[in-house]
């Protein structure tokens, strides 16, 4: 029998991953008296980083038909959208604000069906420590509260990008924006001054749109290869399920094998009057297995040479966003530069940034009023300054994977500690599962992980 002040399962992080894990737990709770707690530093919780925006200009980058929050209920999100507008369908790209509303609606709906099971709390968790004998976990919050839980799920989501070494001098200055998701900072940049976005993926495109919605100015996107995300086709197709490709059934699978297969498959689709995107969509379901089959060396090779090409084809823009970007590039209000940052100095009214252009000995110096770091979420645990991550690392309750793109977890989503063993009663779900699965960032994968984790937790209570 548990002590009455002990929560059965505390979930830290109320973005998609934490919220939907809570929904599955409420649905499947073996004991109606089970006590669940969902803690998020943001108020109101339930939306997380991606769906916390109130601006309808920001669209999902996945069609509605593939955005159901609940594994096994593919129409769940489309049905919700149709309550807003019957014209929405599986191919619609709706706003991220609507998706945030949908997550909160899904949580409220579960709370009404299973009242009293889940409590929500706002606060920043600073540490999680196991008690020596009982194994109960002590959760300490920034406001001084102490919560005791039998099990804890870490659903901490994304962390702000790492500051590139060359930008460190600028990072002290006024108009260097470290967090590209801080929309209010982007909206209040000094008028008309040119802006440099370091990075050219989906985060940079979001920042570009946000900056432009606040007045026209020149925005330059800089990345090593100068690649931009591709667009979805106007009427996207649901990915077809195909078995694991036979060409990749090899004992020592290489990155080259996979890229050759992908290119051949894309050419086949095109020759048959189809679309190259189908080749990516077909492979997507198998990327976790491919990642697991690759040796550490192949993974590194992929991250060094191929990831940029993979990302721009795999993480695509909604068609409306794609045409908006193309218009900005055509009109010259945005441009893309391929090159490497060399150095950056602060000067009157902004920064001078020196860039070595890709594939040449030439340098170019840009004078900009502000710099936004859009290099993508930081998943390198050792460099994340968040106090909770640092405490868990210092106490040996988390370890980074070899490629430094996430953290190690066991088969039941329990985190692996520095002794190589699963940490009792401490679990993780979210984008850092990338370490073990590669493809684990977006809803189509996270919905499987959240359901599976909830099942594991429920099973462990039923034992
Ligand atoms: C801008 C953006 C747009 C995206 N668009 C899409 C899309 O269109 N489709 C798609 O499938 N995927 C998209 N994604 C991918 C996204 O990773 C997933 O869809 C999903 O939102 C991840 O949710 P999460 O809960 O794991 O992380 P997050 O949304 O980051 O949520 C983590 C939560 O944990 C809280 N938290 C963290 N640490 C603490 C602490 N110590 N104490 C208390 N609370 C804490 C945070 O406040 C946050 O609310 C997008 C991602 C981003 C960044």
Image (cartoon, rainbow, N blue to C red):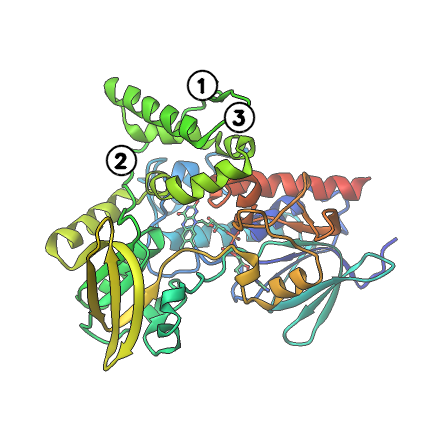
Could you say which is closer to the camera, residue 168 or residue 213?
168
Q: Earlier in the sequence, mark 1 or mark 2?
A: 2
Quarter of the image holding residue 255? Answer: top left
User: Could you say where residue 427 lies in the image, as x and y percent from the top left?
Assistant: 67, 50
* In the image, farthest residue toward the left: 331
Which residue lies under the disc numbered 1? Answer: 247
Q: Earlier in the sequence, mark 2 or mark 3?
A: 2
| Residue at left offset 39%, top offset 60% | 53
**Is residue 459 shown to the viewer in this render?**
yes
Could you say which is closer to the camera, residue 183 or residue 368?
368
* In the image, farthest residue toward the front: 361
Which residue lies under the disc numbered 3? Answer: 252
* In the image, farthest residue toward the bottom: 348
Could you say which is closer to the camera, residue 270 or residue 84?
270
Q: Marks 1 and 3, Cα distance to the nearest angstrom?
A: 12 Å
- Viewer-nearest of labels 1 and 2? 1
Q: Marks 2 and 3, Cα distance to the nearest angstrom?
A: 35 Å
Which quadrant of the figure contains the C terminus?
Answer: top right
| Residue at left offset 45%, top offset 62% | 162
Q: Marks 1 and 2, Cα distance to the nearest angstrom?
A: 27 Å
User: Could you say where residue 56 lies in the image, as x and y percent from the top left?
Assistant: 32, 56
Left or right? Give the position of 463 relative to 26.
right
275 above or below 424?
Answer: above
| Residue at left offset 37%, top offset 31% | 280
Element type at mark 3 = loop
User: Could you say where residue 250 lies in the image, as x and y percent from the top left?
Assistant: 52, 21
Q: Residues within 10 Å of mark 1 (few under 14, many from 20)?
A: few
Ligand 1 within 8 Å, label 1 CB: no
Element type at mark 2 = loop
Which residue lies under the disc numbered 2? Answer: 233
Could you say which is closer to the camera, residue 445 or residue 257?
257
């Amino acid at each position: 029998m548990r002590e009455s002040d002990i929560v059965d399962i505390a979930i830290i992080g109320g973005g998609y991953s934490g919220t939907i894990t809570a929904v599955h737990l409420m649905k499947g709770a073996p004991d109606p008296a089970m006590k669940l707690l969902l803690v998020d530093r943001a108020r109101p919780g339930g939306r997380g980083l991606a769906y916390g925006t109130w601006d309808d200009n920001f669209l999902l980058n996945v069609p509605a038909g593939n955005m159901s929050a609940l594994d096994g209920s593919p129409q769940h999100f489309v049905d919700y959208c149709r309550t807003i507008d019957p014209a929405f369908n599986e191919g619609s790209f709706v706003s991220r604000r609507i998706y945030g509303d949908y997550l909160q609606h899904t949580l409220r709906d579960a709370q009404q069906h299973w009242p009293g099971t889940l409590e929500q709390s706002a606060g920043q968790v600073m540490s999680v420590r196991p008690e020596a004998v009982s194994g109960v976990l002590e959760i300490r919050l920034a406001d001084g509260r102490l919560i005791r839980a039998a099990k804890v799920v870490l659903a901490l989501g994304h962390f702000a990008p790492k500051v590139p070494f060359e930008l460190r001098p600028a990072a002290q200055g006024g108009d260097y924006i470290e967090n590209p998701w801080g929309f209010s900072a982007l909206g209040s940049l000094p008028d008309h001054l040119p802006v440099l976005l370091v990075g050219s993926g989906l985060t940079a495109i979001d920042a570009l749109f946000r900056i432009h919605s606040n007045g026209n100015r020149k925005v330059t996107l800089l990345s090593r290869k100068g690649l931009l995300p591709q667009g979805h086709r106007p009427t996207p197709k649901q990915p077809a399920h195909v078995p694991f490709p036979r060409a990749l059934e090899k004992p020592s699978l290489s990155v080259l094998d996979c890229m050759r297969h992908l290119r051949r498959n894309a050419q086949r689709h095109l020759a048959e009057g189809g679309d190259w995107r189908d080749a990516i969509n077909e492979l997507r379901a198998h990327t976790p297995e491919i990642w697991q089959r690759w040796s550490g060396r192949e993974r590194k090779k992929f991250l060094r040479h191929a990831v940029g090409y993979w990302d721009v084809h795999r993480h695509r823009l909604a068609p409306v966003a794609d045409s908006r970007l193309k218009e900005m590039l055509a009109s010259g209000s945005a441009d893309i530069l391929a090159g490497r940052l060399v150095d950056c100095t602060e000067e009157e009214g902004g920064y001078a940034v020196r860039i070595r252009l890709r594939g040449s000995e030439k340098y170019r110096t840009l004078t900009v009023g502000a710099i936004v770091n859009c290099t993508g979420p930081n998943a390198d645990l050792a460099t994340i300054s968040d106090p909770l991550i640092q405490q868990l690392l210092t106490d040996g309750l988390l370890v980074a994977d070899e490629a430094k793109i996430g953290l190690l977890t066991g088969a039941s989503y329990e985190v692996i500690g520095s002794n190589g063993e699963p940490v009792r009663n401490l679990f993780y779900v979210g984008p850092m599962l990338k370490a073990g699965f590669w493809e684990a960032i977006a809803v189509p994968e996270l919905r499987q992980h959240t359901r599976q984790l909830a099942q594991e937790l429920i099973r462990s209570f039923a034992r």
